[in-house]
Image (spheres, rainbow, N blue to C red):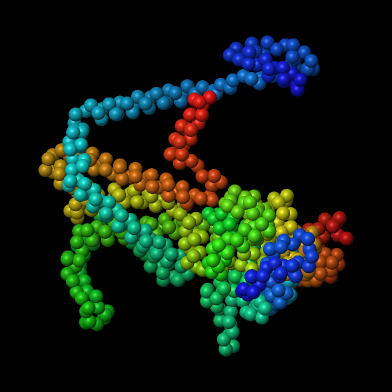
């Protein structure tokens, strides 16, 4: 085989482009020396991948479907894109958007901080701490968020005044009407935060449990203090398990804030409701709100990608390229090819 | 932790290495008076299972004790009581006369607070069967973490020392690799460097080669062999009998939570007194090895 290989390799370029059978028949002189069935040398031929007609049909059908949807979106006058454009950046809508972002940021941050504390309580050795944490999650996961929000807003009905003093005595340092303390904003933040904390506690606990016990043991054996063990060794590893679900929760929260419209709090969704009740342009205004939710979610998804990438350090042998790096590499190799 | 020893690693190493050509110059060898381990009548049970049924063992400073025995005989548990990763139910352990994990007050032994236990552990290095390197940190970051946090060393000093140690285990050029980018043998050598970074009096090895491919075992054993000549007290749980015979001063045979027999490798491997020891070695050692 070794002697024939060189001759065929040299002659192969001349046979390029011909059908394979003709190429094989072209080299009878080379196979004469070998005994048994003639060994055919296939080097020098171009490789052609198998065709997938089904895949092509599917792609075309989906492309047609997409085109139809886009066409109707663009041409059906009842979408009233002009109205959408008019209201998309209107001052009142932008104000509502800011309120939505504020609610998300505050409830998300406090929700996850409280969730972290609850997760640690749940993992502690004290039965009371475990019990309290479990009960918290149980109550707040068992009741509808809508009910929680209305309950917080109507706290004044249950407790007329909120006061700070020494329990079981008449000593009061200050006293305030519950209705002045619990504004719409406070009720919204309270409800969203506590609800979020109940869910994030379980997410964080799951992340912590996913870290191998040996990691804690090794850290303890090295004399690394407990707080540092949590923050430097366990949490960064737990983050890999926490992040995808945590971003699910945050994205859910962005849209979940729309539920506080029941408190007549002027976030994005309540704002567009107020507008379309006045102008009767219901669908275009719902579209305005929807588009803004899509924008927020998209931005968050980009954050998620890069944060997850950061925490995958060491977990994968080599980090995959970012989309930006892929684009750069594409142009770099493309440029090289063209210059040849 | 004696700083005097830390600051003069070369002299200490030269004295302790005793001209062994394999000993690296940067070896941080404690003086001969460090690392006397005294285990007295230690008992431990998990639920209804008695894992340790009154174990007493003395390892002199710089000694190399190798603990062998069947699975479930309590070897690893005994090792883990020495740095108080496992609490004892009864009995006590001292290192250079100091109680591990407890303090005598009145006529009671009170368990130390976490902070004080962590301080004691900086004198006792441990190498695990599954390496337990921190996967999100590079080899170098794994090694410098404990000196910076537990010994409050300046970062630059810890880094310099870590590179020396990685060089000593033959991995200086992999300092910036993450554990998953290293082979099992390389990971275990980083783990040994990490344990050495605290300048421990004592090093505990819990089946350091059990998770390795056969061809990677020797690169780890060679590093431990080199440490055996450095004057650090080593207590090693292993199933590598040939290595045990090479490196041990004392071989300890454990079975069912008790020490059945201990002595020099010659005594234990070639001429065991107890029938239980004899039957165990007849199963694990190939005939050719039995001289």
Query: Could you tell whether A28 is left or right of A293 in the image?
Result: right
The answer to which image quadrant residue A44 occupies is top right
Q: Is residue B79 visible?
A: no
Given residues B45 and B31, the one toward you in this image is B31
Q: Residue furthest right?
A: B291
**x and y percentages locating residue B191 in the rendered image:** 63, 59
Question: Is the N terminus of chain A in the top left, top right, bottom left or bottom right quadrant?
Answer: top right
**x and y percentages locating residue B121 in the rendered image:** 60, 71
The answer to which image quadrant residue A27 occupies is top right
Query: Could you tell whether B71 is left or right of A323 in the image?
Result: right
Residue B216 higher or lower than B227, as above or below: above
Residue A5 higher or lower than A322, as above or below: above
Query: Which residue is depicted at the point 19% across and 74% down?
Result: A175
Residue B231 higher or lower than A64, as above or below: below
Given residues B118 and A334, the one toward you in this image is A334
Query: Which residue is depicted at the point 55% across and 60% down?
Result: A215
Q: Is residue B113 visible?
A: yes
Given residues A184 and A224, the one toward you in this image is A224
**x and y percentages locating residue B212 in the rendered image:** 68, 53
Query: Which residue is depicted at the point 65% across and 60% down?
Result: B165
Query: Which residue is depicted at the point 17% across and 66% down?
Result: A180
**x and y percentages locating residue B207 in the rendered image:** 68, 60
């Amino acid at each position: 085989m070794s002697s024939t290989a060189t001759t065929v390799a040299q002659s192969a370029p001349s046979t390029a482009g011909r059908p394979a059978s003709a190429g094989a028949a072209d080299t009878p002189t080379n196979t004469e020396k070998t005994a048994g069935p003639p060994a055919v040398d296939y080097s020098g031929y171009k490789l052609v991948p198998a065709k997938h007609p089904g895949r092509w049909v599917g792609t075309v059908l989906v492309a047609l479907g997409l085109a139809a949807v886009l066409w109707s979106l663009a041409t059906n006058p009842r979408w009233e894109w002009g109205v959408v454009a008019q209201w998309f950046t209107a001052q009142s809508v932008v104000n509502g958007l800011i309120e939505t972002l504020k609610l998300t940021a505050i409830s998300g941050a406090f929700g996850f901080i409280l969730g972290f504390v609850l997760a640690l309580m749940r993992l502690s050795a004290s039965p009371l701490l475990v019990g309290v944490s479990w009960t918290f999650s149980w109550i707040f996961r068992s009741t509808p968020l809508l009910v929680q929000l209305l309950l917080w807003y109507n706290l004044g009905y249950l407790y007329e005044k909120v006061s700070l003093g020494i329990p079981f005595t008449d000593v009061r340092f200050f006293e305030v009407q519950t209705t002045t303390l619990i504004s719409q904003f406070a009720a919204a933040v309270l409800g969203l935060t506590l609800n979020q904390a109940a869910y994030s506690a379980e997410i964080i606990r799951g992340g912590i449990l996913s870290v191998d016990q040996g990691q804690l043991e090794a850290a303890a054996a090295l004399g690394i203090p407990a707080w540092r063990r949590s923050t430097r060794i366990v949490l960064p590893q737990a983050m890999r398990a926490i992040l995808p679900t945590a971003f699910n929760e945050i994205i859910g929260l962005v849209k979940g804030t729309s539920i506080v419209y029941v408190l007549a709090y002027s976030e994005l969704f309540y704002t567009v409701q107020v507008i379309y009740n006045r102008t009767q342009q219901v669908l275009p205004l719902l579209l305005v709100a929807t588009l803004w939710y899509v924008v927020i979610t998209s931005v968050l998804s980009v954050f998620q990608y890069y944060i997850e990438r950061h925490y995958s350090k060491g977990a994968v042998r080599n980090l995959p390229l970012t989309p930006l790096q892929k684009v750069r590499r594409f142009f770099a190799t493309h440029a090289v090819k063209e210059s040849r | 932790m004696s700083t005097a020893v830390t600051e003069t690693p070369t002299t200490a190493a030269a004295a302790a290495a005793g001209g062994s050509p394999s000993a690296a110059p940067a070896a941080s060898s404690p003086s001969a008076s460090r690392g006397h381990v005294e285990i007295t009548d230690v008992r431990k049970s998990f639920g209804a299972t008695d894992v340790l049924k009154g174990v007493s063992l003395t390892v002199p400073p710089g000694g190399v004790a190798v603990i062998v025995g069947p699975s479930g005989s309590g070897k690893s548990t005994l090792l883990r009581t020495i740095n108080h990763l496992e609490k004892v139910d009864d009995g006590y352990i001292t290192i250079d006369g100091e109680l591990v994990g407890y303090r005598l007050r009145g006529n009671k032994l009170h368990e130390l607070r976490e902070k004080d236990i962590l301080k004691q552990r900086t004198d006792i290095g441990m190498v695990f069967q599954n390496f337990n390197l921190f996967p999100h940190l590079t080899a170098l970051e794994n090694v410098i973490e404990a000196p910076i946090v537990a010994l409050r060393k300046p970062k630059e000093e810890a880094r310099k020392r870590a590179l020396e140690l990685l060089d000593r285990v033959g991995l200086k050029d992999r300092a910036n690799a993450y554990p998953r980018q290293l082979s099992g043998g390389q990971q275990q050598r980083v783990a040994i460097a990490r344990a050495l970074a605290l300048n421990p009096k004592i090093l505990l090895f819990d089946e350091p080669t059990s998770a390795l491919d056969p061809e990677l075992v020797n690169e780890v054993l060679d590093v431990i062999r080199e440490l055996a000549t450095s004057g650090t007290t080593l207590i090693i749980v292993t199933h590598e009998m040939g290595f045990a015979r090479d490196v041990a001063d004392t071989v300890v045979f454990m079975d069912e939570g008790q020490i059945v027999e201990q002595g020099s490798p010659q005594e234990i491997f070639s001429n065991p007194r107890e029938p239980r020891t004899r039957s165990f070695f007849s199963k694990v050692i190939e005939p050719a090895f039995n001289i």
